[in-house]
Amino acid sequence: MPILRSAFIALSRNQPLRHFSERSALGRRMSSRFVAGMEIEDVLRAAQSMQDQGIASTLDSLGENVSTPEQARHSAEIYHQLLDAIAARKLNANVSVKLTQMGMDLSHDLAGEIVSGLVDHAVAVNSFVRVDMEGSEYTQATIDLVGALHAKPANRGHVGIVIQAYLYRSADDIATLTADGIRIRLCKGAYKEPANIAFPEKSAVDDNFVRLTGTLLSSGIYHGIATHDEAMVAAAKDYVGKHSISKSSFEFQMLYGIRRDLQHALVVEGYNVRVYVPFGSEWYPYFMRRLAERPANVLFIARNMLKK
């Protein structure tokens, strides 16, 4: 499995294969399980469908590492449209953005300006912007930006962050962020990182995820526990039960198209569930990282491709 994970992460960076896949009908068909569609209307329909099932959503316009300020501003405009549509349709949804898509590689000031504008918009329509976490080279810059935005009194509760359990530093980062009242989505992590900064073994990542889950659940802040791993879900439920924590004080988060059975079971049990719903033509890196996280998804896709 570690070999397959490394292979899919390497493929996620293969530009010729990405170019071919994102333009082919076969590629779009393969990705459709995990990507809601190509257009804004597609993702809004998916969010409405989730809401009809008692599930909230966070909407993500796929794309990373823009090369011009114009591209960054165009990416942001899609999110402004989403925030307006969420408010107009009264959807139980918010948005997630990547800093590289907002121009971070071009200029930290540019990314800060663009994300600040999105948070201002979220405040105006009473919504929320989650800043996704990317590779470790962006960790500190992401934390710094979110911290600065959240420090503005009007923004409190309207901007949050993602923390990855496979990084050694995450316990300290969570302590800093929760001290400031910042909402966190905890995930295991989907990038390949060196052993000097990240736990190399799955068992160690799992142990850290459980420890960090306990920290978040006891913080009194509304956080998201993002996992499809039934053992991690069970650990969170056990912690909640032992410490008399309200089910309404946090949410489980999962990805569109993955473990729908578990999503619905948690809703029936009275837990809050939010599904991360991506859309857009630049789906290839996201798709490959989903395969890297769970190579069994390859067999799932193959079986479904053979069905009529």
Image: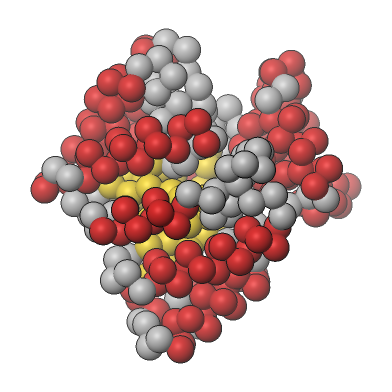
The reply, left or right, for residue 118 in relation to residue 163 is: left
Q: Quadrant of residue 5?
A: top right
Question: Is 189 situated above or below 229?
Answer: above
Where is residue 107 shown, x and y percent of the image? Answer: 35, 17
Q: How many numbered dots are placed on residues in this image?
A: 0
Question: Is 34 situated above or below 98?
Answer: below
Q: For this rendering, which residue is in front, 176 or 22? A: 176
Where is residue 187 shown, x and y percent of the image? Answer: 53, 55
The residue under the point 69% across, 49% down is 200
Colour pattern of the rendering: secondary structure
User: Is residue 73 at all visible to an observer of this figure?
Assistant: no
The residue under the point 46% across, 89% down is 242
Q: Quadrant of residue 222?
A: bottom left
The residue under the point 48% across, 81% down is 239
The residue sitting at the left extreme is: 153
User: Is residue 238 at all visible to an observer of this figure?
Assistant: yes
Q: Quadrant of residue 235?
A: bottom right
The residue sitting at the front extreme is: 196
Where is residue 248 shown, x and y percent of the image? Answer: 35, 76
The residue under the point 47% across, 67% down is 213
Where is residue 50 shown, x and y percent of the image? Answer: 48, 60
